[in-house]
Amino acid sequence: MTRPDPSPLTADERGTLVRVLVVPGASRTEVVGRHGDAVRIRLAAPAEGGKANQALARLLSALCDASVTRVRGGSSRRKIVLIEGRDPVEVESCLGLTRAN
């Protein structure tokens, strides 16, 4: 029997922590969906000079209408970001995540 992957979303007193797997240099910017214990996000921005990190923050901020702060993973494809003032249910909805993703 296989275990389901843990949720990429964790409630925090400041909002919701989201584990993301970033794919920089993609043909377009989009939330792909769940990928194991993370949310896979394609970014058209390159990984150089912090451009992908900036694009990630802009995307999540626009989708969830909230401030976004990177908590961990500045130079890694795997990151943890904080979406401030939103609970996990709200974040799941604004990112278009469903159990089928």
Image: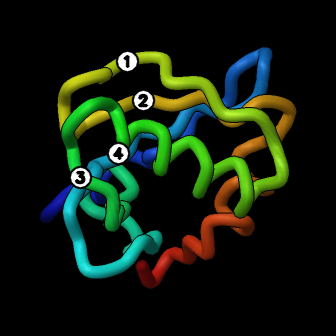
Are the residues flagged by discs 1 and 3 in contact, CB closer than 8 Å?
no
Q: Residues within 10 Å of mark 3 (few under 14, many from 20)?
A: some
State the residue at coordinates (23%, 52%): 46
Instruction: Identify the residue at image location x=44%, y=46%.
Output: 8
Q: Nearer the viewer, mark 4 or mark 2?
A: 4
Where residue 99 appears, x then y in whole percent?
50, 75
Measured Cα–Cα span from mark 4 to mark 1: 14 Å
The percent position of residue 22, horizontal first and vertical second, equals 28, 51
Which residue is label 3 attached to?
46
Query: Which sits earlier in the primary sequence, circle 3 or circle 4?
Result: 3
* Residue drawn at 37 percent across, 18 percent down: 72
Marking on residue 72: 1
Q: Marks 4 and 1: which is nearer the front? A: 4
- Callout 4 secondary element: helix
**Label 1 amino acid?**
Arg
Q: How many marks?
A: 4
Q: Label 1 to label 2, Cα distance in Å?
A: 5 Å
In this rendering, which labeled residue sits more in front, label 3 or label 2? 3
Q: Amino acid at mark 4?
A: Ala
- In the rendered structure, find residue 80 and report the number of the disc placed on it: 2
The residue at which mark 4 appears reads as: 52
Q: Quadrant of residue 90?
A: bottom right
